Image: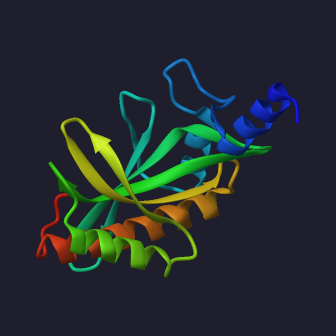
Amino acid sequence: MKPLLLLTAFSLLLGQPGGPAASESGHDARLKRQLEVAKLRFTIDQDGDFRSVFDLPNNRRQTVFISSAVDRVGPLEMREVWAPAYVFAVELDADIARRALRDSDRYGLGAWAVKDWGNESVLVFAAKIPADANPQTLRAAAEIVAGVADAMENDVANGGDAW
């Protein structure tokens, strides 16, 4: 295979960030419409990402972030929906890491990941869904992500509810 063709194929498999629907304020106008139709309350952060707070049982709340940016994976546009569960400064506790890896296999949608957040790192539960998912699918994904992340946060923070 010629090097240029190989490089092109490899870049398609890895995915390309981007997306056609960014507004002047940096957020995805298409996503904003989807969230409005889904009747989700949200704010838009300085990066153009959407933040929604879910009220959960036992007087708990969970913040979910929905990325304006989309990743291109071949012909697909995928959007990330994620929620923080646990903040750590140096290394993720080995028991929590093992639990997250094992738990990831239990869910049909989403998996555990680590994101850098300033000088700290955050264990997050994240789902990648089609960027053009209908509002009901977007809402369902956000609710699942919120519930899973909150359950982990509740366990590892001994009932704490920072998110």
- Name which residue lies at 47% across and 70% down: 144
The residue closer to the viewer here, 70 or 141, is: 70
Left or right: 93 with respect to 135? left
Name which quarter of the figure residue 100 lies in: bottom left
x and y, in percent, of residue 64 in the image:
38, 55
The residue closer to the viewer here, 106 or 32, is: 106
x and y, in percent, of residue 95 in the image:
23, 75
The answer to whether residue 59 shows anywhere in this view is: no
In the rendered view, would you say 90 is above or below 70? below
Left or right: 110 with respect to 92? right
| Residue found at the far top of this picture | 24
In the rendered view, would you say 111 is above or below 73? below
Name which quarter of the figure residue 63 lies in: bottom left
- Name which residue lies at 53% across and 64% down: 141
In the picture, the quarter occupied by the C terminus is: bottom left
x and y, in percent, of residue 73 in the image:
71, 45
x and y, in percent, of residue 86 in the image:
23, 60
Left or right: 3 with respect to 109? right
The residue closer to the viewer here, 111 or 22, is: 111
- Name which residue lies at 51% across and 77% down: 107
The number of numbered badges drawn on the structure is 0
